[in-house]
């Protein structure tokens, strides 16, 4: 019997990557004292955070409907398994007030068929994000399709921190294969489950104030965190 093997490196479509950004954490009353006028001015400042992608020579907000461009692969280029493609995504404290923030990024990954339905066989973990140092994954928040990362240091107003720098499709995806009868009698064909699939990645970022750190994190995110005297998160729990 003759065996026909499809080349697994050229039939995986370059997937669509979607980013959903959340910019709202909370609003706070900011108090400004003026000694000269001997008055107190009460104004409202917004605690917010943005997520941005390097596009060309500048970082562009990808919150809301803008979406991630994923420009490191040409539209007519086949995605290569195991290759780490550059994908520079950063988080910015763009609050209107002078507030340090703790930020987190919720990552959801999935495979989908041509009709848009979700493929539950292929492992979403094969879609690998190169998350940079300084981010701590929370095992309590993890599911089969979701990872949650907390930046362990408070982010000062106007400061930027890199979240990820690469995106890779793990070559182990080729293990999802079955052998079927070929169209020609006496032949069999290896069919790869990822053929004509699309991978999806969704990122959502939000923030809480660094003031009363442990209470703020628990109240906003339901996470019991331990924060040391330098303001750094040392443990994350249920």
Image: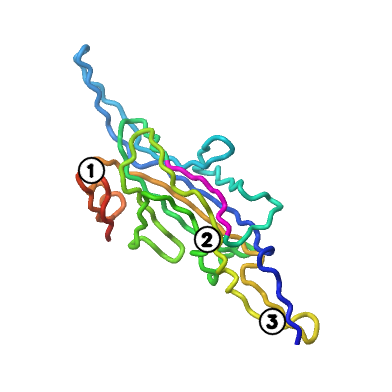
Report the predominant secondary structure element of the magenta stretch.
Answer: strand
Q: Is residue 117 above or below residue 33?
A: below
The alpha-carbon separation of the residues under discs 3 and 2 comes to: 27 Å
Q: Is residue 8 above or below residue 165?
A: below
Does residue 127 belong to the magenta stretch? Answer: no
Residue 170: quarter of image = bottom right
Question: Around disc 2, counting alpha carbons within 10 Å, would you say few (fewer than 14), some (14 to 19), or many (20 or more)?
Answer: some
- Residue 213 horizontal/vertical position (percent): 24, 45
Residue labelled with disc 3: 180
Seen from the viewer's position, the closer of residues 174 and 142 is 174
Q: Secondary structure at mark 2?
A: strand
Q: Which mark is residue 127?
A: 2
The alpha-carbon separation of the residues under discs 2 and 1 comes to: 35 Å
Say which of marks 2 and 1 sits in front. Answer: 1
- Residue 36 horizontal/vertical position (percent): 21, 12
Residue labelled with disc 1: 230
Question: Around disc 3, counting alpha carbons within 10 Å, would you say few (fewer than 14), some (14 to 19), or many (20 or more)?
Answer: few
Q: Is residue 15 above or below residue 56?
A: below
Looking at the image, which residue sits at the far right? 184
Colour scheme: rainbow
Question: Residue placed at 57% from the left, 66% from the top?
Answer: 171
Tell which circle, 3 or 2, labels the residue nearer the N-terminal end: 2
Question: Residue placed at 43% from the left, 50% from the top?
Answer: 132
Please report the bounds of the magenta region as a residue range: 83-91
- Residue 125 horizontal/vertical position (percent): 49, 64
């Amino acid at each position: 019997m003759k065996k026909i093997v499809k080349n697994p490196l050229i039939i995986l479509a370059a997937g669509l990557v979607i980013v959903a950004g959340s910019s709202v954490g909370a609003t706070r009353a900011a108090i400004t004292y003026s000694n000269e006028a001997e008055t107190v001015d009460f104004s409202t400042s917004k605690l917010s955070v943005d997520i941005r992608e390097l596009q060309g020579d500048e970082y562009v907000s990808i919150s809301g409907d803008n979406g991630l461009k994923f420009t490191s692969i040409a539209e007519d280029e086949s995605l290569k398994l195991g290759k780490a493609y550059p994908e520079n995504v950063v988080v910015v404290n763009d609050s209107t007030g002078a507030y340090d923030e703790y930020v987190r990024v919720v990552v959801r990954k999935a495979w989908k068929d041509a009709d848009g339905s979700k493929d539950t066989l292929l492992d979403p973990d094969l879609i690998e994000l190169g998350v940079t140092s300084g981010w701590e994954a929370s095992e309590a928040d993890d599911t089969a399709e979701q990872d949650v990362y907390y930046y362990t240091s408070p982010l000062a107003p106007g400061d930027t921190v890199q979240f990820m720098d690469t995106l890779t499709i793990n070559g182990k995806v080729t293990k999802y294969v079955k052998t079927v009868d070929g169209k020609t009698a006496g032949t069999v064909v290896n069919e790869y489950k990822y053929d004509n699939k699309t991978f999806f990645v969704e990122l959502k970022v939000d923030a809480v104030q660094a003031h009363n750190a442990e209470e703020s994190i628990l109240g906003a995110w339901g996470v019991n965190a331990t924060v040391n005297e330098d303001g750094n998160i040392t443990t994350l729990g249920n």
